[in-house]
Image (spheres, rainbow, N blue to C red):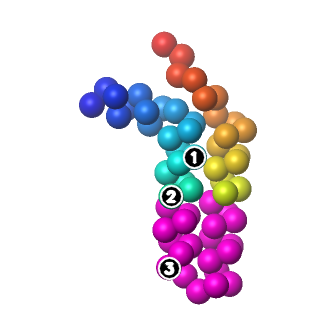
Amino acid sequence: MNYLINRLKEASTWRGIILVVAGVFGWQMPPGIQETVIAGGVALAGVIGAVVPDSVKK
């Protein structure tokens, strides 16, 4: 359980979750909305990558 909690504290985990969710939901939508959802997911992942540090301080 601690392993999962520690992974959820990492920025890379959140970027991965956002990218997977954007890809899955974007894939199921009409083409016009599809690009918007996927681009929004990539942008949000980029913001998290820029704002949240990669390492967990212990």
Q: How many marks?
A: 3
Q: Earlier in the sequence, mark 1 or mark 2?
A: 1
Is 39 covered by the magenta stretch? yes
Numbered range of the magenta stretch: 21-41
Q: In this image, 4 relative to 58: left or right?
A: left
User: Vertically, is 46 above or below 2?
Assistant: below
Residue to which mark 3 is pinned: 28
Q: Earlier in the sequence, mark 1 or mark 3?
A: 1
- Work out how far the residue at label 2 is from the one at label 3, CA to CA, in angstroms: 13 Å
User: Vertically, is 41 above or below 33?
Assistant: above
Task: Give the residue displayed 56% in from the left and 73% down from the top.
Answer: 26
**Secondary structure beneath label 2:** helix
Q: Earlier in the sequence, mark 2 or mark 3?
A: 2
Please name the amino acid that badge 2 sits on. Val
Q: Dot 2: few (<14), some (14–19), or many (≥20) neighbours within 10 Å? A: some
Q: Quadrant of residue 2?
A: top left
Task: Give the residue displayed 54% in from the left and 65% down from the top.
Answer: 23
- Work out how far the residue at label 1 is from the one at label 2, CA to CA, in angstroms: 9 Å
**Secondary structure beneath label 3:** loop
Please name the amino acid that badge 3 sits on. Gln
Image coordinates for residue 1, horizontal then vertical, percent = 27, 31
Image coordinates for residue 7, horizontal then vertical, percent = 43, 33
Q: In this image, 20 relative to 52: left or right?
A: left
Residue to which mark 2 is pinned: 20
**Secondary structure beneath label 1:** helix
Residue to which mark 1 is pinned: 15
Q: Dot 3: few (<14), some (14–19), or many (≥20) neighbours within 10 Å? A: few
User: Vertically, is 40 above or below 53?
Assistant: below
Q: Mark 2 and mark 3 in contact? Answer it, CB < 8 Å.
A: no
Please name the amino acid that badge 1 sits on. Arg
